[in-house]
Amino acid sequence: MEFLTRERKTPQTYYAALDLSPTDPPQITSSYLIPLGPNATLETVRIDAAGRAKVIDGAIAKLDSFYVFADVAKRMADSLRARTTRGMYDTYTNAISFGLKLNTDVRELSRDKHMGVNYSVSPIPPRPATPPPPSPADSARMRARMDELNCGFVKVEQLDGNVGYVKFNGFFDVNACGATASAAMSVVAGSRALIVDLRENGGGSPAMVAYVFVVPLLHAHPPE
């Protein structure tokens, strides 16, 4: 069930959708409320077959260029093309509901919770090839926040049997947290085995991922 709703005292309009179970009586299984801007109509988010094809082709191109597992990317691409050919997306004439459906499908196909498709009412400007450096004030705020969190490192210790244990809850900016990571990993550098506890780690910077897992190797096999 999908509909438009509007704030009582302003022209702000929202797209709302409810997913209902097939039970009797039906139950709401999920819901969405997405701002569209003032005085919007369903024409604002209308999408046709050419638009859907463009979105899917663009998603496949991104997967092919950037997804870490090439075989998974190919499997997703083949499945999305097959579903398009079978007309599984033909009834989605609303860009938001189409985006939500595509999001569900790519997560189902990839089994990757990091994977997702989001719809933006406003055009998203292209990212600059080289992002501007943070201002001194932004850097100072980040440094203070990282110090407060100890860069996500919660516990570093040696367990019985010379087994190292490291628990950290985020891969933060390597420039701000590289020294903290080095200090933490040096504590367990001589361990016979290493436990890295990522159960509450929310992810983050790929550069820090590489840095954290290279540091122990450098300690174990110092470069000549």
Image (cartoon, helix red, strand yellow):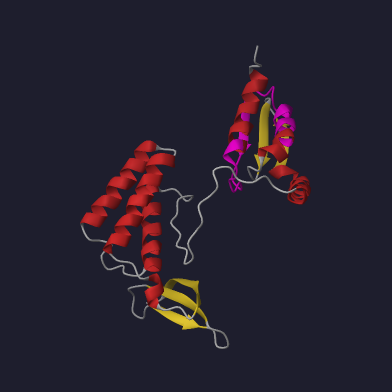
Above or below — where is 95 with respect to 67?
below
Q: Number of numbered discs present?
A: 0
Residue reaching furthest bottom? 8
Above or below — where is 168 with respect to 164?
below
Q: Is residue 197 a member of the stretch shown in magenta?
A: yes
Quadrant containing the N terminus in the rendered view? bottom left
Q: Can residue 46 be seen in this view?
A: yes
Instruction: Provide residue 87's location: percent of width, then percent of height.
Output: 22, 61
Residue appearing at x 74%, y 33% in the figure? 179
Quadrant containing the C terminus in the rendered view? top right
45 or 79: which is nearer to us?
45
Instruction: Provide residue 40's location: percent of width, then percent of height.
Output: 45, 78
16 or 165: which is nearer to us?
16
Residue appearing at x 58%, y 42% in the figure? 130
Does 158 sit left or right of 62 as displayed? right
Above or below — where is 74 with respect to 216?
below
Residue appearing at x 21%, y 57% in the figure? 86
Does 97 sit left or right of 200 as displayed? left
Quarter of the rendering containing residue 163:
top right
Region rendered in magenta? 180-207
Q: Is residue 67 visible?
A: no
Instruction: Provide residue 48's location: percent of width, then percent of height.
Output: 29, 66
Residue reaching furthest left? 86
Instruction: Provide residue 149's location: percent of width, then percent of height.
Output: 74, 48
Quarter of the rendering containing residue 19:
bottom left
198 or 89: which is nearer to us?
89
Residue reaching furthest top? 224
